[in-house]
Image (cartoon, rainbow, N blue to C red):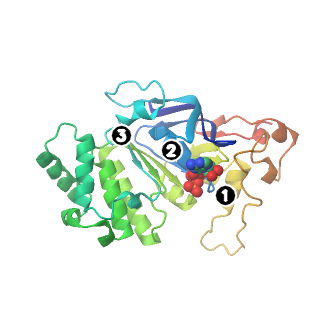
Amino acid sequence: MSLLEIYEISAYYVHNNSTTKAVDNVSFSVEENEIFGIAGESGCGKSTLVKTIYGFIEPPLYLDKGKIIYNFKDSNEINSVTKKNISSNWWKKISYIPQGSMNVLNPVRRIKKFFRNLWKAHSMNLSYEKYYNLVISHLHHLGLPADILEYYPHQLSGGMKQRVVIAAASLFHPELIVADEPTSALDVGVQLDVLRLLIKIQNEYKNTIIIVAHDMSVMANFCSRIAIMYAGNIVEVAETKALFKNPLHPYTKLLIDSLPKIGDIRELKAIPGSPPDLTSPPSGCKFHPRCHFAKNICIKEEPNLKKITIDHAVACHLLER
Ligand SMILES: Nc1ncnc2c1ncn2[C@@H]1O[C@H](COP(=O)(O)OP(=O)(O)OP(=O)(O)O)[C@@H](O)[C@H]1O
C-alpha cells in the first residue's frame, strides 16, 4: 500500500493583489520504505509541496484544493490537510528537515536544550531521564558522540549541525521523513556523509523518505523514484533508472543533458529561457515557451500526468500522440 496518496493538490501564496500558484494540481503517491526524490529548478514549488505534505500550511500559504491520504499505522484518519490535523503526528509519524535546517538550532542554547525542548513538546509520556538515555543511544547509533549535547551550535561544523537535526528528526522512528535540500550549503564530502546517514536511517528503521534536491546527481544515487517538478506541476515521475535512461518529458531531458558526465568533453547546455512567473503562469503546458517541440495544443491545453508504463508517468501532449 502507498504510504501517501496525493490527489490534485493546489497550494498558493496569496498576497493582497497577487496569487503565486506554487503547487498546481499535483497528484502522485509515495510507497512505504522508498526514498522518493522531488527535483526541479529553483522556484518550481518543491519546498511548498513538501511543506503542504507536512501540514505546515500557514498564511500566506493556503491549500486551494486537493486531498492527501496518509496511511500511517495506528493513526487516526487525517480527513483534511490542515496544520491542526497533521501536527499531532509531527516527529512521531512524520518529521520534516527544513531547508537550511541547521539554522533551526538556537545559537545561544546548547544542543541538549534543543533536545529538551523536543521532549517538552513531544515526550510521548517518557520521563526526562528515559528520554535523555534514548537521545544518547540514538546519537551513538548514528555515529554521533554524546558530548555534542554539551556544545553550542557555533561550536559544530555545518555537517555536524545537519546530522544533529537529522538525529532529532529520526529519534521517534517516524514512518515518513521529509528532507528539503538536506545537503545544500555543505561541501561535497560532507554532503555524501549526510546522505549516507539518511540512507542508514532508512535501512534500519524502514521509514519512507521524501528528499527534495535540485541536484540531479543526488537523486540518481539515492532515490528509488523521482518526480520532476516544473512551475508548480509534476511533469514526470519514474523509477530512477528509467528516468535517467529514458527521460520522456522535454524538460526532464534538458535537465539530464545539463549534467556533467565523466569523459564527456562536450560543452554543457543550459536550459534555454527562464522559469515562468508563477503569479501569471503561461497557458496550457507551462513549459511550452521553452520547449523546442511545442505545438498549438501545448499552448491551449494543460497536459495531465499519464502513465506510459506501470512505473513511468509523464505530462506531455507530444507523448499522447
Ligand atoms: N512566502 C511566500 N510568499 C509568496 N511567494 C512565495 C513564498 N514562498 C515561496 N514563494 C514562491 O512560490 C514559488 C515556489 O517556491 P518554492 O520555495 O516552493 O520553490 P522551490 O522549488 O522549493 O525553490 P528552491 O529550490 O529555490 O527552494 C516561487 O515562485 C516562490 O517565489
**In this rendering, position of residue 160 left or right of residue 293:** left
First in sequence, mark 2 or 3: give its number: 2
Tell me the number on the disc at residue 90: 3
User: Which amino acid is tagged 1?
Assistant: Leu
Quadrant containing the N terminus is top left
Spatial CA span between label 2 and label 3: 13 Å
x, y percent for residue 134: 18, 49
| Res. 93 in view | yes
**In this rendering, position of residue 193 left or right of residue 268:** left
Number of numbered discs on residues: 3
Spatial CA span between label 1 and label 2: 21 Å
User: Which amino acid is tagged 3?
Assistant: Trp
**Which residue sits at x=44%, y=35%?**
83
Q: Residues within 10 Å of mark 1 (few under 14, many from 20)?
A: many
Secondary structure at numbered mark 3: loop
| Res. 242 in view | no
**In this rendering, position of residue 8 left or right of residue 316:** left
Which residue is more in the foreground, 247 or 26?
Answer: 26
Which residue is more in the foreground, 256 or 122?
Answer: 122
Tell me the number on the disc at residue 255: 1
**In this rendering, position of residue 238 left or right of residue 192:** right
First in sequence, mark 1 or 3: give its number: 3
**Which residue sits at x=49%, y=63%?**
184
User: Which amino acid is tagged 2?
Assistant: Val
Tell me the number on the disc at residue 50: 2
First in sequence, mark 1 or 2: give its number: 2
For residue 20, what is the image quadrant? top right
User: Does mark 3 have its CB less than 8 Å from ligand 1?
Assistant: no
* Viewer-nearest of discs 1 and 2: 2
Secondary structure at numbered mark 2: helix
Q: Compared with residue 104, is residue 9 higher up or lower down, i.e. above or below? A: above
